[in-house]
Amino acid sequence: MGLLVPILLALLASLFGGLYILGVFRKQRPGEPPLDRGSIPWFGHVLEFRRDTAKFLERMKQKHGDIFTVQLGGNYFTFLMDPSSFGAVVKEARTKLDFNAYVRKQLIKVFGYTQIENESKFLHDSNNRHLKGDGLVLLTESMMKNLQNLMLHSVGKGGDQKAWIEDGLFMYSYNIVFRAGYLSLFGNVSSREAGSTEKSFEMDRIQSDELFKEFRKYDQYFPKLNYGLLSPRESIEVKKLLRLFWKTLSIPVLNNKDNPSSWVHELQQTREELGMKEFMQDRYMFVILWASQGNTGPATFWLLLYLMKNPEAMAAVRGEVDRVVKESGQEVGLGGPKVNLTYDMLQKTPILDSALEETLRLTVAPYLVRAVMENMNFKMADGRAYQIRQGDRLTLFPYTVVHIDSEIHPDPLSFKYDRFLNPDGSKKTDFYKNGKKLRYYTMPWGAGVSKCPGRFFAMNEMKQFVFFMVFYFDLEFKNPNEEIPDVDVKRWGIGAMQPTRDIGFRYRLRF
Ligand code: HEM
Ligand SMILES: *[C@@H]1O[C@H](CO)[C@@H](O)[C@H](O)[C@H]1NC(C)=O
Ligand SMILES: *[C@@H]1O[C@H](CO)[C@@H](O)[C@H](O)[C@H]1NC(C)=O
Ligand SMILES: CC(=O)N[C@H]1CO[C@H](CO)[C@@H](O)[C@@H]1O
């Protein structure tokens, strides 16, 4: 009897503790946003959220208004659905809303990588030094050379130069942009090692293609991996892939390459100097490969697809591209030199810029997540204030809230290549909601401290690829009545969306 009471008490305590952890007792306190825990303890709404995030958030918004808290897999996420209030999140101090606290956990879970002290400060320093200004010019030049190698190596080399070549538009775009981007950042096979320059170009083509095939496998597991939903068999497969990437990108291998970018070089150097173990440096190299190559290829696919579907847009972009080449004074023919597509030429393409911005609006859909570091009082643009609890996550999903809001972007699901152009040909930046001009009218790169540092390079890469495609080639759908495919809804929140199926197309030299 004497023992029974403490045992019962302990049981009760652990039962309550368990229920507490499952989130059963959490109630909306006065001043907090509406709370929707969902019907399943701990998991909350995670199934519906995963099935189609955009649809789920639309439903929650109808039900609760423009701020609410939902339970997802043991965590509470507060979604802010009012674009005019985004600035208050983006500009909040790091002591209250921290980006890195969330990223650190994801990096361990998804990439097996443990951050160094002051990781984000070191990253920012390197970004500022090498992804802008002169560093960006160099990277862009590398990208051009690598694109020429991958896309145009057989041009003017005999064979039937006017033959059509068939491929899948998604796989073709993703493959080329991934490989050229990878070679530009991580360096190419040295001619010393290959024996000749010609041979080194060929080895770059072969090795980058092998890497892409493996990367694509990991990429397809990524949504499940990100949510911890892999089956045991898939987990084993993913670990195998990771080991392969770590080997391919290992420090000795990279040290042997020619022309690595100063950005990647410095990121690695910093870690070495701080005494990071070499295996962890290798893992970091894959984090960088993933961040830099996972989105540009898919986004470029959509851009090319929308241009092919919209003859007027295609004609406008092609006219601009032809003019830019002509004005550069280059004589381009089959046997002659390839277009030297310089950084300066890329600054003279407002129509292509607008078509790209429009594509990103329609097809790039990241979440922006911030960890709430202390209880805070959050003020919305219209003056309402809410208590947000420490330990929760404040989240923005600009795709639903900004990109496809019909008040901000009329006829929001249509591709309009000149949506971001003023009548005088300059970049359009004034967009309104409730009569107020918006600072954040499209957000493919995120915002604030976590805003994508690679965006200038990314835009150049995508423009360079499309520039070469429309300048050098006639493009046709295999099926003349081809439709725009649906997006794979499992990828909401990750970045650039991918199509549910590929599109057959063919290309052949224009001249
Ligand atoms: C279309 C192409 C791209 C898109 C749509 C994109 C989008 C994004 C977004 C939305 C974030 C922020 C994530 C967040 O707030 O949680 C991000 C972060 C990042 N991106 Fe990009 N990105 C692209 C290409 C690139 C490229 C080419 C590079 C490198 C050259 C790059 C390097 C990075 C890095 C290093 C971060 C992490 C920043 C940090 O932790 O502070 N991205 N990107
Ligand atoms: C990290 O930053 C803090 C504060 O700026 C500094 O005191 C510390 O030495 C830094 N650590 C490293 C490894 O640089
Ligand atoms: C391409 O143009 C750049 C900038 O004008 C120049 O530095 C470079 O030498 C040119 N490359 C070729 C192959 O003509
Ligand atoms: C495709 C490409 O850019 N190859 C380069 C690799 O590095 C060597 C050595 O610097 C260059 O000569 C190649 O042009």
Image (cartoon, grey):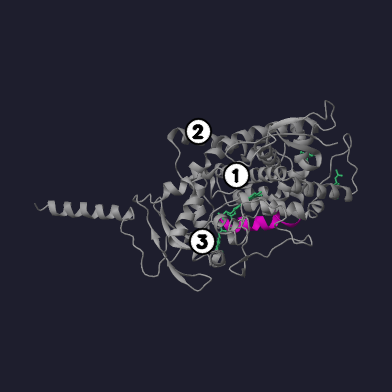
Disc 3 is placed on an element classified as loop
- Measured from the top left, where is residue 293 in percent x and y? 64, 44
Tell me if 312 is positioned left or right of 8 in this view.
Answer: right
Which residue carries the number 1 mark?
290
Gap in angstroms between the C-alphas marked 2 and 3? 38 Å
Q: Looking at the image, which residue sits at the far bottom?
A: 383
Residue 237: give its label.
2
Give the residue displayed 55% in from the left and 35% down from the top: 241
The quadrant holding residue 33 is bottom left
Return the residue nearer the eye: 133 or 472. Answer: 472
Label 3 near label 2: C-beta < 8 Å? no
- Categorize mark 3 by other alpha carbons within 10 Å: few (<14), some (14-19), many (20+): many
- Measured from the top left, where is residue 75 in percent x and y? 41, 54
Disc 2 is placed on an element classified as helix
Residue 126 falls within the magenta-colored stretch: yes
- Please determine whether, in this image, residue 423 is positioned above or below residue 194: below
Can you tell which of label 1 and label 3 is closer to the viewer? 3
Can you tell which of label 2 and label 3 is closer to the viewer? 3
Residue 81: give its label.
3
Q: Can residue 73 be seen in this snapshot?
A: yes
Residue 340: give its label.
none
The quadrant holding residue 470 is top right
Return the residue nearer the eye: 193 or 90. Answer: 90
Q: Can residue 142 be seen in this snapshot?
A: no
Q: Which residues are magenta?
A: 119-133
Name the residue type under label 1. Trp
Disc 1 is placed on an element classified as helix
Name the residue type under label 2. Glu
The image quadrant where one finds the C terminus is: top right
